[in-house]
Image: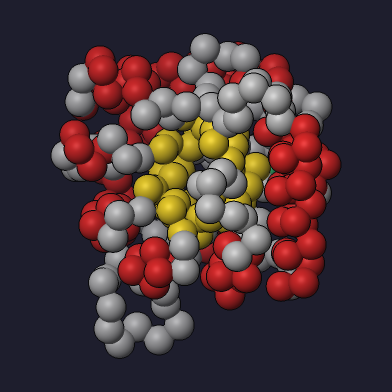
Amino acid sequence: MRQNFVAGNWKMNLTLPEAQALTSEIVQMMHDELTGPAPQVVICPPFPLLAGVGHLLGDSGNPALGAQNCHQKESGAYTGEVSAKQLQSVGCKYVILGHSERRQHFHEDDALLAAKLKTVLAAGLKPIFCVGESLETREADETFDFIGKQLKDGLFHLSNEEFDQVVIAYEPIWAIGTGRTASSQQAQEVHAFIRERVAVAYDAQAAANTTILYGGSCNAQNARELFSQADVDGGLIGGASLKSRDFVEIVKSF
Ligand code: 13P
């Protein structure tokens, strides 16, 4: 279902007490300040903090709990890894997959991500699947080819029913953590391209129903302009999700 949507990716930040304080502030501010229909909000803490943060989110499903990664196997001898079923058992509803930091630092490729998607969906979790080009790719004018390939090789093997559960996030690598946001026009252009690719791979209805987020230096100042674009349904927020006031301002930017 296409919906207004904001997810906070805390990456490898915060201790449990810090995470719980931040969560309580976000929940309280959302309760006090949101009028009208709320966007779907998802908070994605590091693995060890999931349960402790999840307890503070309440039963409404908004905010929902999400993880930042997940192993592709169901269970077994994979020391240090975390399964989809474990995430589901501590209350996760969403999992970020294919973040550029995982692709870059942990060499996750499209084939691995395709396998992770299947496992996550089989456990009843909703993937937030990330795509995005490097500066080099953009400057070589290869952005659309590159993202088209990430979608085709990583995502479009899913059935219609499976694809229905997926949220897509466009995160240009050059905009992540750099303070250099994509212009709303650059974001819209790529989002429209992604939606068009979904229509070709599935159908027009699937394209119209897909939630597509923008991520990369999205903050309380630029969120409204980005979210006002026709094909931008919300944001995947890094740095600004670590400050309750900034994050809630972004949540209110529709
Ligand atoms: P920043 O908002 O810090 O640029 O990070 C974006 C991101 O990577 C979210 O997943």
Instruction: Assign the N terminus to one quadrant of the image.
Output: top left
Residue shown at 19% from the left, 34% from the top = 160
Residue shown at 20% from the left, 25% from the top = 202
Residue shown at 77% from the left, 32% from the top = 33
Quick check: 252 left or right of 70?
right
Residue 83, compared with residue 101, is above or below; it is below
Residue shown at 71% from the left, 48% from the top = 27
Instruction: Assign the C terminus to one quadrant of the image.
Output: top right
Count of numbered circles on the image: 0
- Kindly indicate the quadrant of the structure image that contains residue 19: bottom right
Horizontal and vertical percent position of residue 138: 53, 29
Depth check: 193 or 239 in front?
Answer: 239
- Kindly indicate the quadrant of the structure image that contains residue 171: top right
Horizontal and vertical percent position of residue 219: 75, 34
Residue 71, compared with residue 115, is above or below; it is below
Whether residue 220 is visible: yes
Residue 66, compared with residue 141, is above or below; it is below
Depth check: 74 or 106 in front?
Answer: 74
**Which color scheme does this rendered protein use?**
secondary structure
Residue 156, compared with residue 243, is above or below; it is above
Quick check: 49 left or right of 129?
right
Horizontal and vertical percent position of residue 184: 64, 18
Horizontal and vertical percent position of residue 94: 44, 51
Q: Quadrant of ligand 1?
A: top right
Whether residue 145 is visible: no
